[in-house]
Amino acid sequence: MAWLQATIDMESSVAEKLADALMESGALSAAIEDALAGTALEEPIFGEPGEPVDKLWRQSRIVALFDSASDVALLIAAAANEIPMPMPSFTLETVEEQDWVRLTQSQFEPIRISDRLWITPTWHEAPQPDAINLQLDPGLAFGTGSHPTTRLCLQWLDGNLEAGSSVLDYGCGSGILAIAALKLGAGHTVGIDIDAQAVRSSLDNAAQNGVQATFGLPDSTPAEQFDVLLANILANPLRMLGAMLATHVKTGGKIVLSGILAEQAEELSGIYSSWFEMDPPVFDEGWTRLTGTRRATV
């Protein structure tokens, strides 16, 4: 079976409306992308809690998929009329049927964190069987080890986690950091996330890796202090959660923060210096890891 794929470049101000109208008119799917992706003018957009969610690229590209029997021009015209807007120009190509599972899997190779720590999808042979291999497949929850923020946190765990340390992973996503901590010798480990799907994914991933951790929603955060607290989230929630996170770190314990853009590092380090002796930031592809040691409370 084949499909017809229409590509429409247009101003972002109406891209979302047209994508919705295409779905109403009979498109099987309609995705919005950066029309300038892969060029020097590509615009990275990072959504954060509490910030506007309607921001798109200056120049957007709609990629819409249709049944092979569709009159695509007629359906696009109907969608444009619904907004209303002039009929947009578009390109059309045929997309042949493929083994989409294999195609998707081929995009995810084992990820080397260090000589002894790897992230390995379940369908791959472990590149280094004697290393610590975290079995993690792409899923609905954030965190497969490929993003610099996750990699920065994993590298810290690999080089600094002391055996038996208690760990709180706040914003656990897929559970990757909590699972890695346990594989690296952590003791009591808890993962917290605001997304129930992330909690379910974390439990599944922990079982797949043969480790036991407690995962739950924020209201189940234990009233205790930990040797290590990991928070790989984003700058805006980290700004708001500083005082609360600090209460969960023992005196002399460590905090590890990521999900922070390089230009946000100084501000976030200043905020957390209220409770922690902060270390110099570590950068990777425009992202930052901040670490610090909890001072004694007065």
Image (cartoon, rainbow, N blue to C red):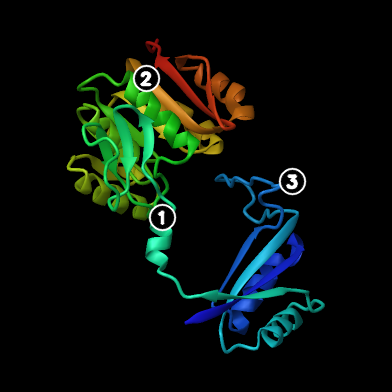
Q: Alpha-carbon neighbours of circle 1 within 10 Å: few (<14), some, or many (≥20)?
A: few
At x 41% / y 50%, what residue is drawn? Answer: 108
* Residue 18, percent from left and from top: 69, 72
Amino acid bearing label 2: Lys
Q: Residues within 10 Å of mark 3 (few under 14, many from 20)?
A: few
Question: Does the residue at mark 2 contact the one at mark 3 (Cβ under 8 Å)?
Answer: no
Tell me residue 164's x, y (percent).
Answer: 20, 22
Disc marking residue 106: 1
Camera sees residue 248: no
- What's the mark number on residue 254? 2
Near-viewer residue (122 or 18) = 122
> Callout 3, which amino acid?
Leu
* Number of other residues with Cα within 10 Å of mark 2, as a class: few under 14, some 14 to 19, many 20 or more: many
- Give the residue drawn at x 74%, y 46%: 41
Circles 1 and 2: CB atoms closer than 8 Å: no
Q: Left or right: where does residue 165 sit relative to residue 52?
A: left
Residue tagged 3: 41
**Residue 258 in sight in this render:** yes
Amino acid under disc 1: Ser
Camera-nearest residue between 240 and 7:
7
Indicate the secondary structure of the residue bearing disc 3: loop
Q: Using residue 17 as the reference point, say whether residue 120 is left or right of it.
A: left
Q: Disc 1 or 2, which lies upstream in sequence?
A: 1
Name the secondary structure under disc 2: strand
Q: Nearer the viewer, mark 3 or mark 1?
A: 1
As drawn, 296 above or below 195? above
* For marks 3 and 1 on the same chain, the one whose residue lies earlier in the sequence: 3
Residue drawn at point x = 82 percent, y = 78 percent: 86
Q: Nearer the viewer, mark 1 or mark 2?
A: 1
